[in-house]
Image (tube, grey):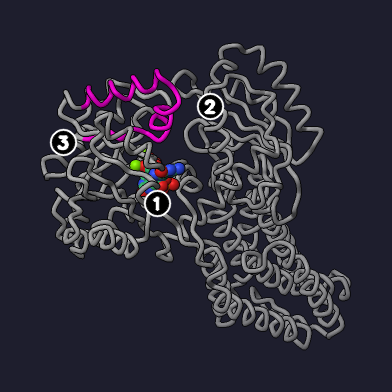
Amino acid sequence: MNVECQFCGLVICILLWVLDSTKKQLNLYGSQLFKYILLLAIFLLSMDIASIICIANQDVLPHLFVITICKTYIVLLVFEVCTALLYLLYDALGERKHRQYAKKIILVNIVEAIAIFAAPLYIHSEGRIAYTEGPGALLAYLFCVIDFAVIIAVAISQRKKILPRRLSAFMVWVSVWLASAIIQFIDAELLLVGFAASLGVLVLYATLENRDGNFVRELGCFNGYALELYLGQLFERQKNFYMVQLSIDEVKANLKDVVENLLRRPVMQKEIYLFKLIGSEFLLITESEDLYSSVMKWLNSDFKNNFELQRRTQVVCLTNALDVGSAQKVVPLAHYLFDRFKGRSLTLDSEVTKDVLDAFLTQEKMQDEILLALKEDRVEVFLQPIFDTHTKKFVSAEALVRIRTPEGGLISPGLFIPAAEKSGSIVDLGERVFEKTCEFIASGRMQKLGVKYIEVNLSVLQCEQTNLAERLSCIMDKYGVDPKSINLEITESATLNAKEILLSNMEKFIARGCSFSLDDFGKGESNLMYIVDMPVSVVKMDYDLTKAFFKSEKARHVVYSVVKMAHDMGLSVVSEGIETKEELDSLVDAGVDYIQGFYFSKPLPVNEFIDYLQTKEML
Ligand code: C2E
Ligand code: MG
Ligand code: MG
């Protein structure tokens, strides 16, 4: 008998089955398919061994029994090739379509099985060589060849839709199989086909279905990759789920301890899954309402009683998770919630309301719009002229970003700058504005009309880039722009560290010849010391302060003092938001050096800005 290979294969498959079954699983559809393949491989190898034993003992066994066992083996062989096709099709079709196709393919399989069972099969046995032949065997080979041809055609035509890892693992499997079939054909003594199937399963397991690839081993929870697969499935199935986000203060907590001692209770439940996001953020997800209630109970008992952990953990619960719209938005939502509820200790009551979700979705939509606008070059720079009260001329302008919609409308920065700041795309956006401004300056049009420099806004996030000065200098060099024609507007930075990075950037810019303005002075909780600490040459009084000037005696004193203080320090003052002649006159009397506001002009597209200056010059 020649069953050593088959026996090895069987052991491999059974070991894989045990390995796979002992771990907590996400019940992913793809993994279920793999389980079918594995199960089928176990049957296939068992039948392979059984058929060889039967053939060897055909003299003592009933002929019909031997033939039935042999036929079952070759039918299973056809089935195994077919499940391979099903497994491959999974990425290309998605779950819903896949289920429909699977039904049809299984039906074809059944018809094939009936045909094989109906056809006569003969046994060839001679020493160590034993195989089946005749119409039944020929039919089985024919079906296998057809299935292989379909598999190769699908793999080639759908290669872009299939996960690259799945495709390559799959190709290894098919190659091993084909090679074994050829070897077996040449040397009938080497019965390798069944064994090759088990090797293939091993390759699939190692590359795709190994649960360890979905696991953060040291913490015993699922990783971001597993989360992506799982969420993809939940959204495709349109199955609502419940999510609890836990953000643990990593500095103070040992994550391993937290997961082992505290999160173990809920995670022990079979259908509550724990995922680790970046840093020390975790998501507990369950599809069952009852299990979600049990998580809530746990939060209100064990969790609440652990005062230390409760103090440093932020909890946000989401019960209407499907409303997020797509799997890709869940992790950004988790980060958004983290930011939004930051600093609150136990916020068990912070179930994500519809308003919070809507705010997040609006921000996401805006973010998509920004990225698309950057890609499609729909980011525009508008210029608002700035009037010099001493020379009575327009000497500069502020560059203000706008997004042009595909329909030709405009989106103003008030709507998209907050989203851009949250997502970080403000860095690219700011650079695009800077580049467009440089392009305009390089055209030389404004210099002819007496405009000496353009003010460009820098966001806090840009200022925190350690290589900001180098990046923007590269752009100035690209357009051959004189750094003196650039003034950068900064606002107050939140943290000390950010302030230090900004300061070092400012020194580099100033060394090249750029100057700085302090924007939004007098807005919110401005810190007077900022003017002292930062090497700015201009202070821009915010719209609010300018308006307050006309409303209150106290504000008037503040404005007078700011102007005097700035002048004593050798700085100039700009007043923003001047809308009327009276406002203009009063602020000129107060000693303000520059005026910016709708009284002169709203921010204008560059060509209209040039036209505006030309008409003003003629007057
Ligand atoms: P900001 O830098 O303080 O710019 C001045 C804002 O006041 C501009 O609004 C301008 O149109 C508006 N403004 C000027 N004069 C008047 C007036 O007389 N009356 C009224 N009601 N408003 C006036 P805009 O263009 O909507 O920009 C809003 C803010 O968005 C800017 O405030 C700035 O913080 C930000 N922003 C605009 N462009 C950029 C950019 O390229 N980068 C960055 N980081 N932020 C930008
Ligand atoms: Mg500004
Ligand atoms: Mg301002």
Whole-percent x and y of residue 82? 70, 72
In the picture, the disc for residue 602 is 1
Left or right for 592, reference 118: left
The numbered mark, 2 or 3, whose residue comes first in the sequence reads 2
Q: Nearer the viewer, residue 81 or 513?
A: 513
Residue 560 shown in magenta:
yes
Tell me which amino acid carries mark 2: Lys
Check mark 1 vs ligand 1: CB closer than 8 Å? yes or no.
yes
Q: Residue at x 54, y 19 (%)?
A: 312
Tell me which amino acid carries mark 1: Lys
> How would you rate the neighbour count of disc 1 (Cα within 10 Å): few for under 14, some for 14-19, many for 20 or more?
some
Q: Which residue is mark 3?
A: 507
Q: Which residues are magenta?
A: 538-566
Magenta stretch mostly in which secondary structure?
helix
In the picture, the disc for residue 342 is 2
**Quadrant of the rendered structure where residue 127 is?**
bottom right
Left or right for 524, reference 140: left
The numbered mark, 1 or 2, whose residue comes first in the sequence reads 2
* Residue 254 visible here: yes
